[in-house]
Amino acid sequence: MLDLTHAPQSDPLRLYRYRDGLYAVDLLIAALVHLDFFTWLAAQPADKAAICRSLQLAERPVDVMLTLFTANGFVRQENGVFHVTEVAREHLVNGSPWFLGPYFGSLKDRPVALDMLKVLRTGKPANWGSSKSEKEWSKAMEDEDFARRFTAAMDCRGIHLGRAVAQALVPGGRTRLLDIAGGSGIYACAIAANHPEVQATVFEKPPVDLVAAKHIAERGYAERVTVLPGDMFRDPLPTGFDMHLFSNVLHDWDTPVVKQLLAKSFAALPPGGLLVIHDMHLHGDKSGPLPVAEYSVILMHSTEGKCYSLGELEALFAEVGFHGLKHISTAADRSIVTTSKPH
């Protein structure tokens, strides 16, 4: 049985970044070639609302696009207004002798680049992996075969990430963890392995609940980690737990849905209960980190969400009643954010 308390001898960070940032170039192609965005912005610096209104684009993907371009140093923000930087003015603005538009233009018909254009205009996610045979992610997960394959993919990622989450977590005397939409249960198992006092339950909707139970049993954690079938949207979260974990969950949903999930967590936790969010998190000013801004693009493309900034999370916590925010780096550009329900 794999020891979930030990790290691998080598660091797989470059491999994670290859996969996490896979779609970022296609968003650049869509903006540069199809929208001629940098030429437009150079002529008329604008805030996000004006960009959406003038170019007839949706807010969520534009937010992801501006974050990516800020993290890359292509645009800068002053009092909410975005301007092109010198590197963009020289290399991304049409009419410059160093303009690279045609270089990227030769790739303009890449399927994902065309998807990006549609997502920017509609705000709606594209099919998973840009495959015509797949639905958007949230719909595809209702199919048993896709759910099994996707859960297996997230499970192998979580073997490395889960240990780091567990070792960054300080339960503070809390002993009952609810892993909400916990996939294969890898994070719950890792926390149980690193904190012997903790009992965990994975709350998952069918058919993923059966996949989770199988993975947990194969790892030898069935006595420490149980599975409870349920839908985090349709069902109230079960009570009796003093810790909640959302691992790689909130980033699949837009802000109103994230607020709804946080409110359900607040209602179910007892006073003093701890909320733990494991994800890739942006700086408060959305200036980076670049790997997080790049990962946000694949979320924008394939789900209804994006990567959230620490500032966005802190504001949402306060709105639903949580108090405080603590941010701890874990592994592969990820981190945990914790907050608590006041006594």
Image: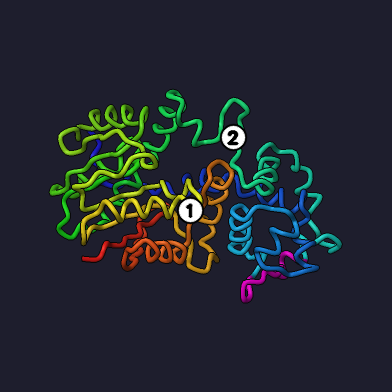
Q: Is residue 85 left or right of residue 310?
A: right
Check disc 1 and give the amino acid type: Pro
Q: Residue at left 56%, top 31%?
A: 135
Q: Is residue 168 above or below residue 111?
A: below
Where in the figure is residue 310, as x and y percent of width and height? Answer: 44, 64
Q: Residue at left 20%, top 44%?
A: 193
Which region is colored magenta?
A: 77-89
Q: Residue at left 62%, top 56%?
A: 59
**Within the image, what quadrant is residue 281 found in?**
bottom left
Q: Quadrant of the N terminus?
A: top left
Q: Quadrant of the C terminus?
A: bottom left
Label ID, residue 127? 2
Question: For mark 1, what is the residue?
Answer: 256
Crowd around label 2: few <14 · some 14–19 · many ≥20 (10 Å): many
Question: Does residue 81 show up magenta in the picture?
Answer: yes
Q: Residue at left 26%, top 45%?
A: 178
Q: Is residue 108 left or right of residue 233?
A: right
Where in the figure is residue 50, as x and y percent of width and height? Answer: 70, 64
Question: Does residue 59 show up magenta in the picture?
Answer: no
